[in-house]
Amino acid sequence: MRAAGASAYPRLRTRAGILSRDSEADCPTHAIVTTIVILILLAAILYNLGAGLYFMMTDRGSTNRTVRSLTWRIGLSVLLILLVIVGILTGVIKPHGIGQ
């Protein structure tokens, strides 16, 4: 439950003449870096998935490029999951809305 008078939306406030939301104003640099790392890993995972599909269609099983591409995809997915778990345990990533 929210406190009386509390809004579900962050209020706008000015800081040095610039409008910003509460969540953006309090956002540390490591949160931005974490988001960028996660997005880069997701892009690499999708690239390897597409490359595996392309190699599967063009090579017709004559090379092992499909296996290599999908192996990279699995490895990057495991790395992403482990980084998210470590981020949650160390407090860098703060899950919200779970169990509330």
Image (cartoon, rainbow, N blue to C red):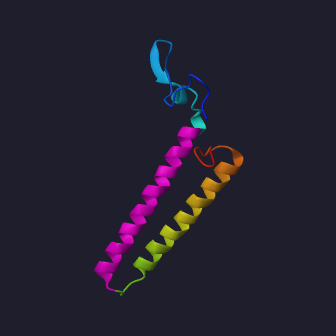
Residue drawn at (36%, 87%), measured in percent from left and top? 61
Question: What is the x, y in percent for residue 66?
Answer: 41, 78
User: Which is nearer the eye, 97 or 31?
Assistant: 97
Quadrant of the rendering where the C terminus is positioned: top right
User: Which is nearer the eye, 100 or 67?
Assistant: 100
Q: Is residue 22 above or below residue 51?
A: above
Q: Is residue 43 magenta?
A: yes
Q: Which residue is most to the bottom? A: 62
Label tally? 0
Q: Which residues are magenta?
A: 31-60
Is residue 56 found left or right of 79 in the rendered image? left
In the rendered image, which quarter is residue 3 located in?
top right
Residue drawn at (45%, 59%), measured in percent from left and top? 44
Q: Is residue 68 above or below residue 21?
A: below
Q: Is residue 44 magenta?
A: yes
User: Which is nearer the eye, 38 or 3?
Assistant: 3
The prevailing secondary structure element of the residues shown in magenta is helix
Is residue 66 found left or right of 8 in the rendered image? left
Residue drawn at (52%, 45%), measured in percent from left and top? 35
Q: Which residue is most to the top? A: 17
Is residue 40 found left or right of 52 in the rendered image? right
Is residue 7 found left or right of 47 in the rendered image? right
In the rendered image, which quarter is residue 50 located in?
bottom left
Residue drawn at (50%, 45%), measured in percent from left and top? 36
Q: Is residue 70 above or below residue 7?
A: below
Question: What is the x, y in percent for residue 69?
Answer: 44, 72
Question: What is the x, y in percent for residue 67?
Answer: 45, 79
Question: What is the x, y in percent for residue 13?
Answer: 50, 17
Q: Is residue 1 above or below residue 15?
A: below
Quadrant of the rendering where the N terminus is positioned: top right
